Amino acid sequence: NYIADFVCLKEKLIVEIDGRYHQLPENLKNDKERTDWLNSEGFRVIRFTNEEVLTNLDKVLNTISNTLKMPPSGDRGGSDGGKILLATVKGDVHDIGKNIVGVVLSCNNYEIIDLGVMVPPEKIIEAAKKEKVDVIGLSGLITPSLDEMVHLAKEMELQNFKVPLLIGGATTSKAHTAVKIDPEYQNAVVHVHDASKAVTVVGDLLQKDTSEAFKEQLKSEYEKVREGFYNRTEKKEYVSLAEARENKLKIDWKTAEIPVPKMIGVKVIEKVNLKKVIDYIDWGPFFRVWELKGRYPDILNDKIAGKEASRLFSDAKKMLNTVIKKDLLKAKAVFGIFPANSVEDDIEIYDPKDRNKKINKVVSLRQQIKKINGKPNLALSDFIAPKESGINDYIGCFAVTSGFGTEELAREFEADHDDYKVIMIKAISDRLAEALAEFLHQEVRMKFWGYSTDEQLNNEDLIKEEYTGIRPAPGYPASPDHTEKKTIWKLLDVEKNTGIKLTESLAMWPASSVSGYYFANKESRYFGVGKIKRDQLEDFAKRKKMSLEEAEKWLSPNLA
């Protein structure tokens, strides 16, 4: 029992600052014995004199940095809490949530093996066996990642794994975990909603006196979740695709205002001035990244979260100012406005110079839940004038990023063992990407399409989407099919014009990227497609010219 000057459990590091008292012979002997014992327990111990700290701080910091580059020595090594493997699944590039979970667990004396992003299942399996981990944690943001998690659970069962499986990420849910993943793996499967719950969950899973009871409780709880899910599904009423189309949104196209764009075609913005974008930042999601609940700016004065929120906000503004001043992040954008008409649930897109030449199409999905009180079964195609009407209409699309430079900065912070700044730069980069999407949409409305030239909205109005038109994104409720990103990439030649790439699961890289469509019709609105029936799945597969199996894969979360 003794008092250490500095302890970092995550890195198994102890730093001692020795005054004159420690230079006495008997104390030198005691300190050596204590250091030897700590080394045997897997700790790295560094000792400095007061004079070294006061007169040569650079040397002190370099010594600490160099020590951290070497693995802990000794018989015990690692940590006493257990060994946890974390990975963002194949095809997914988002890792902020995973990183926060890793930091929280490591600070509670768990050893973390972080495999990073886009990790194939075979690599996860191999690393788990090699490292003899106690828990595997999977993360993902986009819906295709859900299937990757199911696949890995099946593989773990086939290979007779006995370690618990944690599931997390924005697209995951307790219901999906219970219905799709838990039945595939006999050991514990747990949906972890946020990082603050991870320590308790892992502790209950690994402690001998709570482990078995907790696992039994989980299996029982998830069985009830499945029953509830299937009961609710059975009670929901759906209509056929033909009936849903008959109940589409009916716009009087003869009297509808169709704004003619001032610019038709594709425009590339090679370098975006991020100074123009800052005022468009929605800070609400930034605080949710850190799991602080509350609305911005009210959260800054919150009795519970206000102090921490204010500190985070101050640090974020400082880093943001540095990023802008030193031009550390590169932002790019491309957008286009094209002649278009709807044909049933498709939106045909025509050559900007020749409306008679079809160059692509958007395949939209229609709500099939039974509606009441005259409410329509919506599809995005409802907001575009039908081809048979003879009316010329238009559609826009875009892709933006503020992510070039983010990974390089994150790696620099990782080299300095600064997890806080790693998470901070990624959170700021994400906010800038969303702000750029907001900024560009306003530019399109006011200048390039020009249907809202007198628009005067503040940032709060923009966040509330109080403008005319919408910008739905593939992979989100109104357009849940991620493969529609390929349409945008072809129309805008996105990779060539911006460098933004699509992974095999159709996540965007860099991670801080946004893409979507522009609809200008006054009747256009956001909605969720929800669950669809077999008839629409088959119709969708034909329209997309893909196999039924592939269609099921991409629309899995939306199948009733």
Image (cartoon, rainbow, N blue to C red):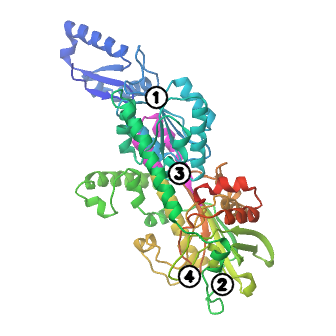
Q: CA distance from mark 4 to mark 3?
A: 30 Å
* Residue under pointer 3: 141
Q: Tell me the quadrant of the picture where the C terminus can be found.
A: bottom right
Q: From mark 2 to mark 3, how far is it between C-alphas?
A: 37 Å
Q: Where on the picture, by quarter, is residue 10?
A: top left
What amino acid does circle 1 point to? Asp
Label located before the other in sequence (4 or 3): 3
Q: CA distance from mark 3 to mark 1?
A: 24 Å
Task: Identify which amino acid the numbered label 2 is placed on.
Answer: Val
The label shown at residue 134 is 1
Q: Which residues are magenta?
A: 400-426
Above or below, 454 against 189 in this view is below
Q: Nearer the viewer, mark 2 or mark 3?
A: 3
- State which tag comes first along the sequence, 3 or 1: 1
What's the residue at 42%, 23% (across, down)?
78
Identity, as a three-letter code, of the amino acid under mark 4: Glu
Comes first in the chain, label 2 or label 1: 1
**Is residue 422 inside the magenta stretch?**
yes
Marks 1 and 4: CB-CB under 8 Å?
Answer: no
Q: Secondary structure at mark 1?
A: loop
Is label 3 in a helix, a strand or a loop?
A: loop
Left or right: where does residue 268 sit relative to residue 156? right
State how far apart marks 2 and 1 are (Cα): 61 Å
Mark drawn on residue 14: none
Disc 4: which residue: 523
The residue under the point 71% across, 84% down is 392
Q: Residues within 10 Å of mark 2 (few under 14, many from 20)?
A: some
Mark 2: which secondary structure? loop
Q: Earlier in the sequence, mark 1 or mark 4?
A: 1
